[in-house]
Amino acid sequence: MNPFRSRPVAGYTANGDDRRAWMELQPAPDRRKRQPGTILLYCAALLLLGLAAAQGYVSWRAQYNFVFAAKREHLPSVLEALGLDTGAVIFALLGLAHARMGRPALIERTLNLVCAFGSMTMNLLGADLGSPRSVAVYVLPALLYAACSDRLIATAGHAAGVQETSVWRFFGMALMYGLRAVVALPSTAKGLRLRLLQATPLPTGQGESHTAGAQFAGVPADVVGAAKASLRATVAAGNPLSVNQLQERFSLSRRAATEVRNDVLAESNGHAQM
């Protein structure tokens, strides 16, 4: 196999007299060249298979004992105990396949972790919840597999040039919002409700006209804007909302409600009733 290939030099072409262009030799790219860390990645994948087999057996035994104690049937208990761990391995392999193809594997990584945490929960139900040692022994296999498999998929994706948000970031955000709800439940619930309503607008029916849909184009997205719009409507009707009414309807502080009322009344040039 010739390791060199020839190509025309820039600026020279062959003419009609069959004169050949100047050529230069340059090394042909070696397609068999591996990226740095490829061998280590393969080794990690093989070790993960061994880890999945070992930890999966330990997890299966715990789940089998738990399921068998409830069903008292051997074969159904065996099959049910295999479900979550087998699903986790399947989703991990699908995630690796997506990563090696240079595609994001967010769904596969999420489902892999869901199955692993489901397996951990099943193990936990069979442990002695009053003993920290028993809890640690029963949850360790699933946690170890979840961490190793997800990091292997992420590393394989990085090697293939995939840029995606870490799955653990979403778990971290959920944990932070959970802690915030503990210390400030009312404001957290209101903020999440407003965020949910903004992220899920109601679709416009196919039979509705563009004019009807345009009526909602100017709907304010924030609470202060909504309060001002409502107050303007009541000012026009000759019965402006009071500060207390603004506080109650829009969950504003007294200072914010006062500022909203002053701003809207100033816009009406003081002709509204006080």
Image (cartoon, rainbow, N blue to C red):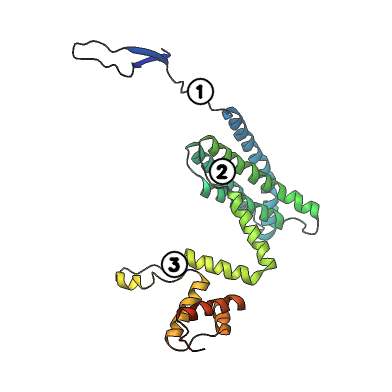
What crowding class fits label 3: few (fewer than 14 Cα within 10 Å), some (14-19), or many (20 or more)? few
> Which comes before the other along the chain, label 3 or label 1?
1
The kind of residue on which mark 1 rests is Lys
x and y percentages locating residue 13 in the rendered image: 26, 17
Q: Is any atom of residue 208 visible in this view?
A: no
Q: Is residue 256 left or right of residue 65?
A: left
Gap in angstroms between the C-alphas marked 1 and 2 = 26 Å
Q: Secondary structure at mark 1?
A: loop
The kind of residue on which mark 3 rests is Pro
Quadrant of the image containing the N terminus: top left
Q: Kindly identify which numbered label has been placed on residue 33.
A: 1
Most extreme residue toward the left, as rendered? 16
Q: Residue at x 68, y 48 (%)?
A: 143
The quarter holding residue 209 reads bottom left
Gap in angstroms between the C-alphas marked 3 and 1 = 51 Å
x and y percentages locating residue 218 in the rendered image: 40, 70
Quick check: marks 3 and 2 in contact, CB under 8 Å?
Answer: no
The kind of residue on which mark 2 rests is Ala
Q: Secondary structure at mark 3?
A: loop
Q: Kindly identify which numbered label has been placed on residue 201.
A: 3
Q: Residue at x 46, y 70 (%)?
A: 220
Q: Is residue 28 left or right of residue 249?
A: left
Q: Is residue 58 left or right of residue 264?
A: right
Q: Which residue is mark 2?
A: 92
Along the line of sight, the residue nearer the viewer: 118 or 155: 155
> Which comes before the other along the chain, label 3 or label 2?
2
